[in-house]
Amino acid sequence: MEQKHPIPPFTEETAKQKIQLAEDAWNSKDPVKVSLAYTPNSEWRNRGTFLNGREDIIKFLNYKWSTELNYKLKKTYWAHTENRIAVRFEYEYHNKDGQWFRAHGNENWEFDENGLMSKRYASINDVPIRQEDCKF
């Protein structure tokens, strides 16, 4: 059975470790690496897009990072329970026309007993910014 440590039940410390691991994986922009943190049948809502399973996640992330160029993400701890973590995040990217954006949002995560994320619900808003206003 696959395991991704740390595993539930989470403490504040292990929740923050899980968040840092997720941030590092997403900043790698490697869809396969990212997908391995999720259960094979993981449920996602990303804005208005609904996904099920690792294959959908990989396709989604391949497209995302082909259009959101120079992507850089920062996640921060919001709250946790035994097998759930809530995070706030910001990321920046530019499109093919050179317009920069900062995306702000919240994610709610639920994990199985092996530390794999079984549910990810993300609410995200994009704000156009000037390149000189980038934080990351």
Image (cartoon, rainbow, N blue to C red):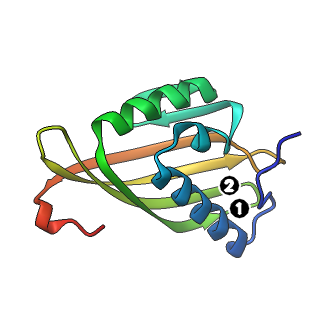
Q: Residue at x 61, y 49 (%)?
A: 109
Is there a contact, CB below 8 Å, between mark 1 and mark 2? yes
Query: Distance between the Cα atoms at labels 1 and 2?
Result: 5 Å
* Residue 88 image-quadrant placement: bottom left
Image x and y of residue 120, in percent: 57, 42
**Residue appearing at x 78%, y 44% in the figure:** 112
Residue 15 vs 25, above or below: the answer is below
Which residue corresponds to the image point at 68% horizontal and 54% vertical from the top-left?
84
- Mark 2, Cα crowd under 10 Å, few <14 / some 14-19 / many 20+, is some
Give the number of the disc on residue 50: none
Left-right relation of 23 to 47: right
Residue under numbered circle 1: 81
For the residue pair 20 and 30, the one nearer the viewer reads as: 30
Tell me where residue 100 appears, x and y as whole percent: 17, 52
Task: Look at the numbered disc 1 and give the secondary structure of its residue.
Answer: loop
Note whether 89 is above or below 55 in the view shown: below
Write down the residue under mark 2.
84
Mark 2: secondary structure? strand
Kind of residue indicated by mark 1: Thr
